[in-house]
Amino acid sequence: MNIICLTLVSFTAGLIGTLAGGGSNLVLMPLIDSLLGAQAVPPVVTTGIMLSNSQRILLFRQSINWQVVQWYLPGAGAGAFLGAYVFTCAKIEGLQILIGFFLVATVFSSGFSKQEKSFTVRTWYFLIAGFLGSFISGIIGSTGPALNTFYLNYGLNKEQMIATKAANVLVVNFAKMLIYAICGSLTRHYMLYGLAIGIAAAPANWIGQFVLIKINDEWFKYLINCLTVFSGMVILWEQRNSFFGLVNYLFIQIYLLANFLF
């Protein structure tokens, strides 16, 4: 029953991911958490997204920007290995909250601007962005559309962004899966759920390819902005208890420090 539920949601998530440049994993993560537990989220999501992006590469392979890929992968590979290893050894709190604020801030800082670029991105920026994004992804399972703004401001159109991002994510997820498997976090049970997610996303990717042709670049950017804000709000809502707990802890520490000083 759990697999059937995940399969149905994965189809919808895959269609959203193709039309809005990613973010399908953020739709799946809360469901996986509720069905299998928090420890299942990174390995299951990684397996499913790797299969889904493999198909996207086949569908959009002619649009891959290999210059971006060449800069992204070295940093992303190192970040993925390190993040996945940290996930298997420790639990780091607060990263989801930071990502949620980052997603919302990146869009509202430009005010949903219709300008072609809100800031300039050099090719070498992807080396650093790849490392940071993959490191955090290895720990919590996904960063969602956090890096979409880099692809757009670099100047990629909708097909180029989806194809290039899929190529980058495929290699990163393979590295994460390898570490999860070596450290025992990727069980056969989790792999089965991941395979179900990836297979269910296949027809969604195929349908999304034809729908994407009908969408112009301006609407594509608007969809990405909406998805980015929505993803950030979902993350913040899910982490509200941790957020208020963190705020309460900080207030207590400030109060104790003030009493000590004065």
Image: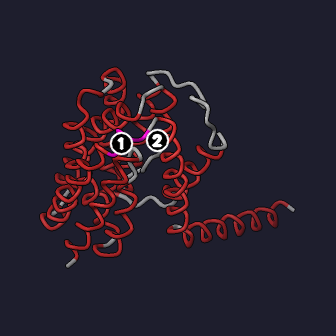
Q: Which mark is residue 220?
A: 2
**Which residue is more in the foreground, 95 or 262?**
95
Q: Which mark is residue 225?
A: none
Which residue sits at x=52%, y=30%?
153
Which amino acid lies under the numbered mark 1 shown in the image of this protein? Leu
- Going by the picture, which residue comes out furthest to the left? 188
Query: Is 41 left, or right, of 229 in this rendering?
Result: left
Task: Report how far apart the C-alphas of labels 2 and 1 lie in the structure.
Answer: 8 Å
What secondary structure predominates along the stretch shown in magenta? helix
Residue 85 shown in magenta: no
**Which residue is more in the foreground, 205 or 100?**
205
- Which stretch is magenta? 211-215
**Residue 62 at what x, y percent from top left?**
24, 26
Which residue sits at x=53%, y=44%?
222
Which amino acid lies under the numbered mark 2 shown in the image of this protein? Phe
Residue contact at pointers 2 and 1, CB within 8 angstroms = yes
Q: Which mark is residue 212?
A: 1
